[in-house]
């Protein structure tokens, strides 16, 4: 069955027609009240943006969704995962630096009015193993264990170009964005003989020097 797609006009004649207010109306029209029960933990999955990025979703747009979940009796939490430990950049590769990056971009408990969950511990390397029944190359992946604690998830995505010539959006925000570091490696590297998951060896001594585990 085809999914319903809702759109909103980006024009605004007054403050009541601004993006946050219209976004909440769109959520109500789409049936947000039927997605969870009062008391449920509702994850709002975002991309906090790498350091230097200027095009991630604005925090006050996300805050409007937080407030709507709270109005309906849910317990909202902002959720995001760390980047691939083998990937480029370092502004979101571990939880400590990721928190600083997210806060720079306006995503913290003070601005959001709710908790901001990043991967468990300093680095959520393992995650929870999940089968990929119809995978062509990939028959399993690993989802961030924090995601298993949620009763419902609202995925809020911004679209961007990708170095491989495609666009990243809502599907990537779930398929890659909810994976642990090991899951991201599985997806990106799969069974590469040199760089694949089986050949990957993590030097914990170096990791702990870069990002000491709090005692």
Image (cartoon, helix red, strand yellow):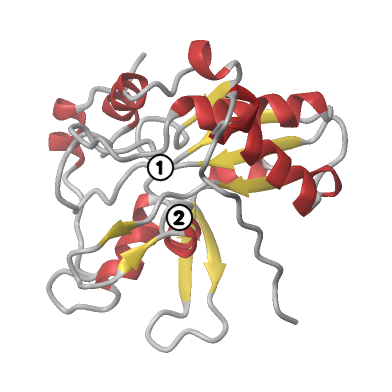
* Mark nearer the N terminus (2 vs 1): 1
Packing grade of label 2 (10 A; few <14, some 14-19, many >=20) is: many
Q: Residue at x 43, y 52 (%)?
A: 177
Q: Residue at x 45, y 19 (%)?
A: 108
Quadrant for the N terminus in the image: bottom right
Q: Is residue 162 above or below residue 19?
A: below
According to the picture, the residue beneath numbered tag 2 turns out to be: 173
Give x and y (percent) for residue 107: 43, 24
Which SS class for mark 1?
Answer: loop
**Position of 103 compared to 150: left or right?**
left
**Position of 39 compared to 132: left or right?**
right
Give x and y (percent) for residue 197: 27, 67
Q: Nearer the viewer, residue 123 or 58?
A: 58
Circles 2, 1 touching at the beta carbon (< 8 Å):
yes
Q: CA distance from mark 2 to mark 1?
A: 7 Å
Where residue 67 is drawn, which disc sits there? none
According to the picture, the residue beneath numbered tag 1 turns out to be: 47
Packing grade of label 1 (10 A; few <14, some 14-19, many >=20) is: some
- The residue at the far front in this view is 13
Give x and y (percent) for residue 147: 58, 46
Quadrant for the C terminus in the image: top left
Asked whether residue 197 appears in the rendered view, the answer is no
- Please state the total of marks drawn on the protein image: 2
Which SS class for mark 2?
Answer: helix
Q: Residue at x 30, y 46 (%)?
A: 83
Q: Is residue 52 above or below residue 171?
A: above
């Amino acid at each position: 069955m085809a999914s319903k797609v809702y759109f909103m006009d980006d024009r605004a004649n007054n403050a009541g027609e601004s993006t946050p207010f219209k976004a909440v109306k769109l959520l109500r029209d789409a049936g947000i009240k039927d997605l969870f029960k009062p008391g449920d933990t509702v994850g709002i999955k975002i991309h906090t943006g790498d350091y230097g990025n200027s095009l991630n979703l604005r925090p006050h747009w996300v805050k409007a969704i937080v407030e709507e979940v709270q109005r309906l009796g849910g317990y909202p939490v902002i959720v995001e995962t760390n980047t691939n430990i083998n990937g480029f950049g370092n502004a979101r590769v571990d939880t400590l630096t990721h928190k600083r990056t997210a806060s720079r971009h306006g995503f913290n408990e003070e601005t959001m009015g709710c908790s901001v969950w990043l991967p468990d511990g300093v680095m959520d390397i393992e995650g929870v193993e999940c089968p990929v029944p119809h995978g062509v190359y990939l028959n399993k992946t690993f989802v961030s264990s924090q995601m298993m604690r949620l009763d419902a998830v609202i995925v809020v995505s911004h679209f961007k170009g990708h170095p491989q010539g495609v666009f990243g959006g809502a599907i990537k925000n779930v398929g890659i964005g909810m994976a642990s570091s090991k899951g991201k490696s599985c997806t990106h590297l799969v069974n590469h003989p040199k760089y694949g998951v089986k050949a990957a060896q993590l030097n914990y001594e170096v990791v702990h020097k870069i990002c000491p585990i709090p005692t």
